[in-house]
Each structure stands twice: as C-alpha cells, then as structure tokens.
Amino acid sequence: MKLDILAFGAHPDDIELGAGGTIAKAIAEGKKVGVIDLTKGELGTRGTAETRKTEAASAAKILGLSARENLGFADGFFINDKKHQLEVIKMLRKYKPDIVLCNAIDDRHIDHGKGSKLVSDACFLSGLIKIETELDGTNQEQWRPKHVYHYIQWKNLEPDFVVDISDFIEIKQKAVIAYQTQFFNGDSNEPETPITSKTFLDSINYRARDLGRLVGVDYAEGFTVERYIAVDSLFDLK
C-alpha cells in the first residue's frame, strides 16, 4: 500500500499528541496516512502493553488511518543501530511514503530523541540500492521519502513551520483521550505522572491555540525540518 504520509512514534500516543491534528487534516483532504509505533510503551507507569494496543487501535479509527503497525522495539532501551534501522527501512519500503513524520529531535523522554534520529537515519539508508531487505518473502525496492519533519512534544522547541489545525483540534483531542490509561482520570488510583495531570490535558488545547495565535489562526501544530523549505513564490507563504 502506497501512503502519502507515514508517521513514526517511539510510543503509542506520541503521534496523536504531536501531530494528531495535522494527520486528521491530511486524511480529510484525501491523503492516505499510516502510523508506525516503535515500542509498545510497556515501561509506562500506567497501563500495559495490551491496553496501549487497544487504545492505539481506537485512536487509529478516530483519525481514520489507513494502516498502523508496532515494531515491538524495547521501550526505553532500543538503540539506533543496524538491526533497528533495517526494521524501519522495511516499513519505509513497504509503504513508500512521500512524507515522514517522526519524534522531536530533543525532548524530555530519552526515547523521543533516539527515535527521531533512528527514523531519520533509516530514511536516508532506505534509498540505498545496495541495502537489501525482504518482507513476507519478497525482496523490497529502495525508497527514500521526499521530506522528513519532526513534530514538537514536551519541550517548546521553536518550530520551522506550523500547520493550521483549527478545524481538527477536536479530532486530535479525541484521539489523545482514547489513551484512557495514560492521561487525566479523576477516578484513577494509579500513580501520578507528568502527563496524567489535568494541566497536561489542558495544555493540548492551549499550546495549539498559542501556536495558532502566532500565525493568525485558532489552532496550529509545529514542526522542525532537516533542510531548507523551498517554495515557488513568496505568495505560497501564508
């Protein structure tokens, strides 16, 4: 299946938090979008690998994803080496995305920066013809995405561009709340974490509103880039 966008996240819920609105908007515009979760989030304080799997499936339906897979890397301990790169390359060659979205280049959780570099490196390597991969008994052809963008997560990194998600903030919020074990729940008796507070849940809205304010729209999501963004004309910029 050829996808327009393939989004990678170190953990189930990373993508919904960082790029859920952008993905929902792309799908509404007729684009095919898939998600690859690198780990099952098994080290999370709340929930289990099994509950995260169920929640990820619910979020996929809310967003309208064409595909979602989990590579089952070790939460907290995966590294950017040949073994892990090849598994990511297989997904890139399977779905042949034009655009790849991946974790923030620097963030509070150590897996975010690692996942960011791992996917970015794999995007380059996937275009090399002499790297051979096989999936389901079939040899794969090389493929390199045209663009790699990094969504913003815990840290307030300065975005290189923002996407207007004003009409899709509610879908983003619903996709995030699908992870019932991970975020604010006043009835929960499980330990508190930095992302289980009411303040964090509220921040999904007000951070998007603040980015939107800076560009004259209601809500926006920010991304960083690896190379210059080119436009045909100054009039392409909003």
Image: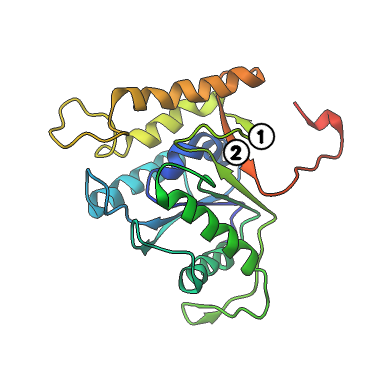
As drawn, the residue found furthest toward the right would be 233
Tell me the number on the disc at residue 140. Answer: none
Q: Residue at x 27, y 52 (%)?
A: 43
Q: Residue at x 46, y 44 (%)?
A: 15
Q: Confirm whether residue 217 shows in the render.
A: no
In the image: residue 56, left or right of residue 79:
left
Tell me the number on the disc at residue 223. Answer: 2
- Compared to residue 133, the image places residue 154 above or below, namely above
Tell me the number on the disc at residue 161. Answer: 1
Amino acid on which disc 2 is placed: Phe
Q: Residues within 10 Å of mark 2 (few under 14, many from 20)?
A: many
Q: The residue tagged with tag 1: helix, strand or loop?
A: strand
In the image: residue 236, left or right of residue 159:
right
In the image: residue 51, left or right of residue 119:
left
Q: Residue at x 54, y 56 (%)?
A: 117
Q: The residue tagged with tag 2: helix, strand or loop?
A: strand
Q: Residues within 10 Å of mark 1 (few under 14, many from 20)?
A: some
Amino acid on which disc 1 is placed: Phe
As drawn, the residue found furthest toward the left would be 189
Residue 220 percent location from the top left of the image: 57, 27
Q: Confirm whether residue 45 shows in the render.
A: yes
Residue 150 percent location from the top left of the image: 57, 45
- Compared to residue 217, the image places residue 128 above or below, namely below
Do the residues bearing badges 2 and 1 touch, measured as CB atoms within 8 Å? yes
Q: CA distance from mark 2 to mark 1?
A: 6 Å
Residue 4 percent location from the top left of the image: 62, 52
